Amino acid sequence: MSPAKPAVAAAVAFALLAPASQSMLGWGQSAAEFSDAGDRTLRAAGWAFSIWGLIYTGLVAFAVHQWRDRTDAFARVRWPAAAAALGCGLWIVAAGLDARWLTVPIIALSAVAAILAARNARPAAQTSRTHRILALWPLSLLAGWLTIATLVNLLTVLTSEGYVPDGARTGAALAGIAAAVLIAAAVGLAGRLTVYLLPVIWGLAGVAAAAREDGQPTVMAAALLAAGLLALLAAWRFFADRAGVAPAPAGHSAAPR
């Protein structure tokens, strides 16, 4: 058996157990308490984080699916997927210990690993609807959410450490939203990952809702515009793939979402 199989299972288990153990045992500060220390620049409404239920479910489904698979379909998927899942758990530990700066590279590297895993899962998704549903989609959801979470986390840390003064918060928030759009659009187009865009859109909707609550109309408008643009891109990507008109990367044929 490839050591990557149990590595994925162990990493997903750790990603689930880290927040569960914190909730049950009460060690360290919660993710909400960590965010509260610096969420005055950019934050998402609390309901937006409900997506973790879907992401965790998808990760468990992928862990089981890749374990049962007897082919080489996930040879290039398992290690980056394991790294991404491991990073989710490590972020909980770092945030719980209030290691603010450590959370920045952890979540950023986890996002990169999840994007790589999702891109590497696309060839398998071309051959099997099951692979698409149980591998490509869960990894794409994780990658998309970690993309926007990385930017929110960075601004949270910078704010809590005093690097974003009051007068610069709107500008910093707008820069974070712009970065989210540019990164998500680049990854979604280059990797042809339609589902990847959906959690980014969801996160931006959460940012818009939070900005409305906080009386930040400029940030709210920017987040809504960004979500709308990515929604249009996702719709185009979806219908272009279905019509088979989108150019495929070298060496690959048109692929599913």
Image (cartoon, rainbow, N blue to C red):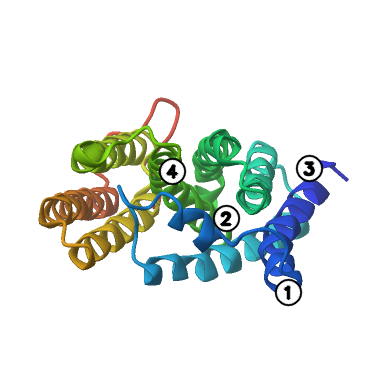
Q: Crowdedness of circle 3 by 10 Å Cα count: few (<14), some, many (20+)? A: many
Q: Are marks 4 and 1 in contact (CB under 8 Å)?
A: no
Compared across the picture, whether 248 is left or right of 157 comes to left
* Residue plotted at (60% across, 50% down): 95
Comparing labels 4 and 2, the label whose residue is closer to the camera? 4
Q: CA distance from mark 3 to mark 4?
A: 38 Å
In this picture, is 94 found above or below 190? Answer: below
Query: In the rendered view, would you say 34 is above or below 171?
Result: below
Q: Amino acid at mark 1?
A: Met
Which tag is nearer the camera, tag 3 or tag 4? 4
Residue type pointed to by label 3 = Ala
The circle drawn on residue 135 is: 2
Tell me where residue 100 appears, x and y as whole percent.
56, 41
**Residue 218 as seen in the image, left or right of residue 18:** left
Q: Mark 1 falls on what kind of element?
A: helix
Residue behind mark 4: 160
Image-based side of 87 in relation to 43, left or right = right
Question: Quadrant location of residue 67?
Answer: bottom right
Q: Position of residue 226 (x, y in %)?
A: 19, 49
- Quarter residue 242 falls in: bottom left
- Amino acid found under the numbered disc labelled 2: Ala
Q: Mark 3 or mark 2, which has the lower sequence index? A: 3
Q: Which residue is mark 1?
A: 24
Q: Mark 3 = which residue? A: 4
Task: Find numbered disc 2 in the image and state the secondary structure of the residue it sits on.
Answer: helix
Tag 2 or tag 4, which sits nearer the N-term?
Answer: 2
Report, in whole angstroms, how far the alpha carbon at label 4 lies from the one at label 1: 27 Å
Local packing at callout 2 (Cα closer than 10 Å; few below 14, some 14-19, many 20+) is many
Q: Residue at x 38, y 41 (%)?
A: 159
Amino acid on which disc 4 is placed = Ser
